[in-house]
Every structure is written in structure tokens, then in C-alpha cells.
Amino acid sequence: MSDTAMTDTVIQLNHVQLEYGKFRALNDISLLVPEGEVLGLLGHNGAGKTTTIKLLLGLLESSAGSVSVFGGDPLDREHAGKIRNNIGYLPENLSFYPQLTGLETLSYFADLKGANKKEKDSLLEEVGLAHAAHRKLKTYSKGMRQRLGLAQALLNQPGLLILDEPTVGLDPVATQDLYLTIDKLKQQGATVILCSHVLSGIEEHIDRAVILAKGCVLADGSLERLRAQTQLPMQIRVKGRIEENGWLKDISDSEIDLQRINGSQYLFTCPISEKVSLLKNIMAEDSVNDLEIHAPSLEAIYQFYNRHASALEKE
Amino acid sequence: MNKILIVAKKEFRDGLRNRWVAGISIVLALFAMGISYFGTAASGSVGFASLSTTVVSLSSLAIFLIPLIALILAYDSIVGEDEQGTLILLLTYPLQRSQLMAGKFIGHAGIMALATLIGFGSAGLLIAIFSPHASFEELLTSYSVFILSSILLGWVFVAMAYLISVSSNEKSRATGVALMVWFVFVFVFDLLLLGILVTSGGGVGENLFAYLLLLNPTDIFRLINLSSFEATQVQSGIASIAEEGLIQPVVLFVSLLAWLLLLYLLAVWRFNKRI
């Protein structure tokens, strides 16, 4: 990693606004991303994710507010020249050059980035394309092209990795490999922006989620914080028998909801604040064989904020 | 390696790999030899004509072919990269837009130059060998001027293709505009000039008319190649301007270079404005 990464804050957006003609694509966006964080930038199509990314890459100019990446304006030619070697980017819908082989494609981008030759082979190995290195890209599946895209984004071990919809077209195994790569990069100290509208699976790999809608930040925080903010209930599934005449008979008076399944399973839905006391009661039962705890998923949090925003808009 | 050269090398290799160079060379060589051999068929005999005669006929054909080939070669150079998602990627690399454009131009210019040289050059060589009327001296002088101006004309239309490419949001649109531009410069412009000349009843002087021709690079190319030969057999309006030497050949070459520079700089300027 180059010395441009030697700063605590990698990305800073201050009250950024951006218009395409009369359409306001970003509205008062503020965002601070410290070094080493994996940030999930989430939102529907058209929420402003790609526009935000283009601002960070110096491809667009904001109409108001300020943008800083590695301590400088990405539009500043001199600064951009310094930081571009330290940014890896995987754009959405990347199809590359059909007439080139995987290795030739990676070589072209490696040469442009001044990466060394050994890195190309190891990256192809890392993304699982070593066997197809000499095949033309027109024979690659969408998932293979996506993996090649990831390989080029990893050239030069970037300090900031920006991945726009990286799991589109990937099979479950390749998706999992991608997340493992992100985990590895995080361990190496890289900052990662993971932009996605596919939410399942990413929650274990991000430190923080920023939810965008119609160019505005709807929510920003760690999953724990967002769960606390939303007050979404959690679910506890219990297998075994619970004494009906004990604490269970008073449950209808509480905020806890109970569903009985097949007479030997119970599904409790409770606010996070009731979690500990409920668990204590369950664990005190002798005939409980197993239990599963499901905290509100990222998908549920995401839907909560979007519903909330739609309701506010209707008012 | 220099960033411009990396891009140029890729574009040039693409041209070789896609058989652009081979394809263009074969087409140009076949047309050149065909025109030379069958050019005198109207007089009742066939056989290789002299290089001077060949060039006069060939330049009329090159006016159609070279711009069309150059436009097809380069019309999607930017918009095509945009559609396949590589443009946005390249723009995030440590590579300036002007470097990307320069690299592409060097690559495409190399393809045009090599193909023209091989195509017309090999045909010229064969004609010089087999035609009793042709000489190697012509090959080194007038025919070389023809090849050089053909290459330059190709480069002008490569730059024109870039301007179209950076100004288009879709490849299909760029295709349409490229064909329209070709049609305007190759057909419409001369018709318009002729129309002006006729309707003005000679009001447009010969000098002004000659300079109006500089507004079309294909006409400049025609003037260069007609004025290069003493024995011009085609007596068209343009040929008479060429014969009378109203515009010096060096001015004609400079005009073609000016066209190239203007279109290229416009393309770079538009590229820098493109989101």
C-alpha cells in the first residue's frame, strides 16, 4: 500500500449535493469512512450508490459540499494521480474485451497500473481463474468475468477497494469466495466499500451499513446500532417442552409474541430489550433441547428504513 | 512502459488480431490492381496502366474507401468501451483521458498506415514490375505521394471517428452518425459546391472555389493526387484546379494535417467533457 493510505480517514463527504440537470441525484450526503472499515453502501437501483462511487473516483463533480479521498479532492489532477494506484474498483456490468484472454486482459490493466508481473498470476489463482487464463473472454461466463474484474481491482493491493454490485452473476460458492477475499483484505488493513442491493450474506462481512434512498442517507451505523434504532423484534426458536403453567401463562400480557409449532416447538418474537429475561426463563426449563436466536436481519432493517421513508413521503 | 504506448500496443494488436490490417490490405491491393488492369477496358483493351493513370482512377476510389474504413475502424473506440464497462474502469486508473485518446490514436493510426502501405504499396510494386508503361521512379515519387496522402486521409477520418465516438452515448447512434458523416463528405459536399457554383452563375470565383474545397478533407486528398501528375487524364472541375496549381501541394498537405489536428483536439476536448 502506498503512503497515501497513511491517514485515519480514507473517505469524507460533507453535505454533498449533485444534480443531473433538474434531477437531484444526491441530496446532502455526509459520510466518514475510517481506514480499515468495510462499509456496505446499500440501496435500491437509482438510490445514488453508483453516483456516490463516481464522486469518490473523481468521475463526477458535486454541485455543493466537499469530497475527500485519502485526504484530497479526487478531482484535483495532482492528487488523483497519486491516489489512483491505491484504489481498486470493480464497476457494475463489466464485460471487458471479448477478443482478449483472461491473462491478456489482466496484463493490460496491470501494465496501466504499474503492477508487477508475478502479481497477475497469483491474482488469477486467487480468484479461481488460473485454469482459464488463456481462454478468450467471449467464452467466459458472467461469473468468470466478474471474478476477473475482482482480480483487476486487487492489482497493487489497493488501500481502498470499491466494489459496485460485485455478487451479480456469481454462484453461491464464488460469492462466498468474494466475501472471504474481502475479509482477508480487511485483515490487511484495506478499506472496502461494498455497494449492493443484494443483502443476503453481506451482513457478516461489513462493519457498517449506509442505506441510501432517492439520493439521501436513510440510515448509517453498525448493524447493532441500526437494530437498536429500528427496535425490530428478534426471534427465538425453541425445541422441547416448556411448562405451560409457569412463566408462559403470563406471556400474553407482555410484549412477547408466541407461536406454538407442532406441539414441540415454540417461536418467540420479542423486542431486543426483553431478550435477556426471556432467555433466562427458557434456559431454566429442563425439557428444552435446542434453541436458535435470530437477530433482525440486514434485509429486515433495510426494509424497515425504506418503509419508514415511504410513509414519511406520503405524509 | 509509457501509458500511451500501453494503450497503443493493445489497440494495434487488436487490429492485427481482428484481421483489420490483413482485411484492409487485401481490399486496397485488389482494388488498386483491378483498377490498373481493367481501367483501360473502355478503350477495348485490358492490361496494367501506368502508375500515374492508376493513381488518378485510384484516388477517386480511395476517397470512398479510406474514410469508410477509418470510420468503421474507430467509431466505437470510446462509446464501445463505455458499453462494455471498461471506459469507466480505465478512467479510474492512473491514466489521463488525453493519454487514453493518444494511445488509441497511435494504435489506430498504425493500423491504417500499415494496411494502406501494404495494400497500395504491394499493388504499386506489382504494377511497376508488370506494366510496360509504369516505372519505379513513379513508384518512389507520385505513387508514394498517393500512399502518404491516403494514410493522412485515413488518420483524418480516424480522428473524425473519435469525435463521433466521444459525442455518442450509444454505439448504434455512433454507427448512424459515422455513416452520415461519410455520406456528407464523400457525396453531399461536392454536390452542394456544384449547386452553389451553378446557381451563382459563376459568381463564385475559381480561387474562392478552390479554397472552399479545403473545407472537405476528401477534396484536399483529390487535389493532392491530381496535382501530383502531369498527365492528368480526368478533366473534371477539380482536376482543372489541380492542374492550374491554384493551391500548392504543400498547402494541401498542411490543410490535411490541420484537419487532423482540429478533429483530434476537438475529440479530446469533448472526451474531457464527457461524464
Image: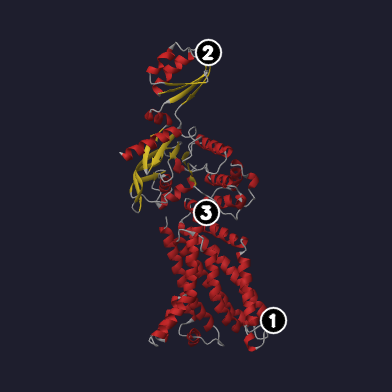
Secondary element at tag 1: helix
**Local crowd size for mark 3, using a 10 Å CA cut-off: few (<14), some (14–19), many (≥20):** some
Q: Residue at x 63, y 74 (%)?
A: B29
Q: Which chain is disc 3 placed on?
A: B
Q: Which residue is disc 2 drawn over? A: A287
Q: Quadrant of residue B197?
A: bottom left
**Residue type indicated by callout 1:** Phe
* Residue contact between numbered discs 1 and 3, judged by CB atoms under 8 Å: no
Q: Which chain is disc 1 placed on?
A: B
**Residue type indicated by callout 3:** Gln
Residues at discs 1 and 3 both on one chain: yes
Q: Which residue is disc 3 drawn over? A: B84
**Local crowd size for mark 2, using a 10 Å CA cut-off: few (<14), some (14–19), many (≥20):** few
Residue A216 picture location, percent across and down: 36, 42
In the image, is residue B188 above or below residue A108? below
Q: Residue at x 64, y 47 (%)?
A: A132
Estimate the spatial distance between the alpha carbons at disc 1 and disc 2, rounded to whole Å: 105 Å
Q: Is residue B126 left or right of residue A22?
A: right
Q: Which chain is disc 2 placed on?
A: A
**Residue type indicated by callout 2:** Ser
In the image, is residue A165 above or below residue B129? above
Q: Quadrant of residue A43?
A: top left
Q: Which mark is residue B130?
A: 1
